[in-house]
Amino acid sequence: MRRNGLFVGVVMACLSAFSETRVLIVREKSCVDEWRVTDNGQWTRKGTWLACGTDLKGPHSIAAADGIVYVGDSRGDAGAILKFTPDGKFLGVLASVPARPEALAIRDGFLYVCSAFGKNANQLFRYSLSDGKGGVCLTQGLSVPRTLAFGADGLLYTANRGSGEIAVFDVAGDKPTCKAAYNSPAQTHGGMLLDYDRDRLLIPSKKPESIDLITGTAKRPLMPIPVQNAFSAAFVNGEFCFADHTGKIVAWDPDTGKSTVRATGVQGVCDLLNLTEALDGTASRRRTAASARLRAAGKTFAYKRFDPERPYDYTPLRYNNPDATPYLKTGLICYPMAFDYDGDGDLDLVVSNWGIPTWRGTWYFENPTPKGKKDALPIFKPARKVGEGCSNVSAKTYPDGRVAVLRQNQITWEFSKSGWEGLKTLAGLPKNIHYNNVRCNMWRLADYDRRQGRPDRRHRRLGAVRLAQRLRRKRQLEERADTRTRVLDQERGGCRRRGEVGYAANRAP
């Protein structure tokens, strides 16, 4: 009996070892790691599945089908789709992509690739898995797409980080079309995950969202997820797992709202792949079963804007024109400036867009309020392009009516006439006001000298770095000053000139 029990134990242990799920984690422009996940949710790193070298330059996305693993390789403003065996052996190049392969999705013998940044941003490419032929198939409805996935309805879901929407496309024909655009306040990272078993869409963020695709309603659990930038996700051993770019894998239960950190030390993770399910067809079968179930029940997905149930979210603003649609189509990276552009005495709206290529430029929205009247909520006229798009810009109106428009160490007082061509460089300013150059390098004028009719030169030359240095130097001088001197200085009403502190100290009795 003991031998039989021992034999059964060994067999069960072997089966348990072989039941581990293989997960590939793409670390941006670094490598592809292989992890093993047990049924109880334990993640263990097995090593580097693929490292940068002769074939791989900068991995960024991954997908698998029919025993082949496809890796999107980033090479500056361009990229390539590489083919590998499940063990990491290089098989060749499927296709070259004129953009960084941000995310991959496979269906019906085609590989779909989206781009989010660079020269050819916000485009969808399609390539045949048999011969690699293909190219651009869609340029509309994309705004910094970070994730691609096919739903049970056969449509392609795209998480647009720029517009905060989930865009749904029908890509079956030669001319893909947009079926819907789901607006979600949780869509801040560009991540999503389709739950085929429950017909819902999961969006990770600090305040995640679970969207019912049948009714078109959304719910936001009260418990946040400990993520900062989660745009990669995978379904692993019954858990919805999101990868935080800062270096951890978080499992989330959308029914209870609870989350658990399953793995750490994966900094720069930008894509996840459940290799086991992708190769054995489990993911495809789950999607096919969901599609059949929906057809049998006569149900279809609700292609409309969601009406989320958000008990603690913001209240929508009421506009003075209920039929107006306040959508300027300026994209993610836009810089609005409110000033009198046409000189008629009211505030117009000028938006410099550096995001969506089709709307890239500086756009003027005229305020139609008649002269002599005021309108707190005007409905602006359609946009008119007045220049090229610029980043990190701001505007300020002064009491005499003059308007200063700034852009990174440059200024113009005649923007309405000369546009960006009238910019003049300001000398003596730091190249970037942030010590590590990670934030928008914005500039603003702090004061105005009415007597000179121009900005106060002291404030104009004072960036954030100079201000910090000046305050730090002031504190150091105060700490070094003699206590007796400071007391006398306070009794005499304070110093009015340089050197008065020493003068007061010398006169002390």
Image (cartoon, helix red, strand yellow):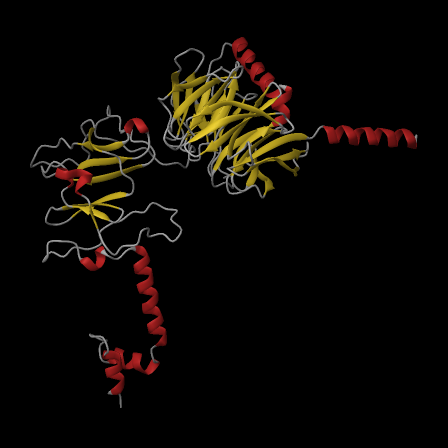
For image coordinates 24% across by 78% down, the residue present is 499
Q: Position of residue 92 (x, y in %)?
A: 56, 24
Q: Nearer the viewer, residue 353 or 163?
A: 353
Quarter containing the N terminus: top right
Which residue is most to the left?
372
Q: Nearer the viewer, residue 437 or 8?
A: 437
Which residue is most to the front?
54
Q: Which quadrant of the view contains residue 69?
A: top right
Left or right: 48, with 359 as reference point:
right
**Would residue 487 be seen by someone viewing this image from the given angle?**
yes
Q: Nearer the viewer, residue 293 or 39?
A: 39
The correct choice, above or below, for 496 with respect to 212 in the image is below
Quarter containing the C terminus: bottom left
For image coordinates 24% across by 83% down, the residue present is 504
Left or right: 220, with 455 as reference point:
right
Q: Which quadrant of the view contains residue 357?
A: top left
The correct choice, above or below, for 271 with respect to 408 in the image is above
Q: Position of residue 318 (x, y in %)?
A: 26, 31
The correct choice, above or below, for 502 with respect to 435 in the image is below
Q: Nearer the viewer, residue 357 or 230?
A: 357
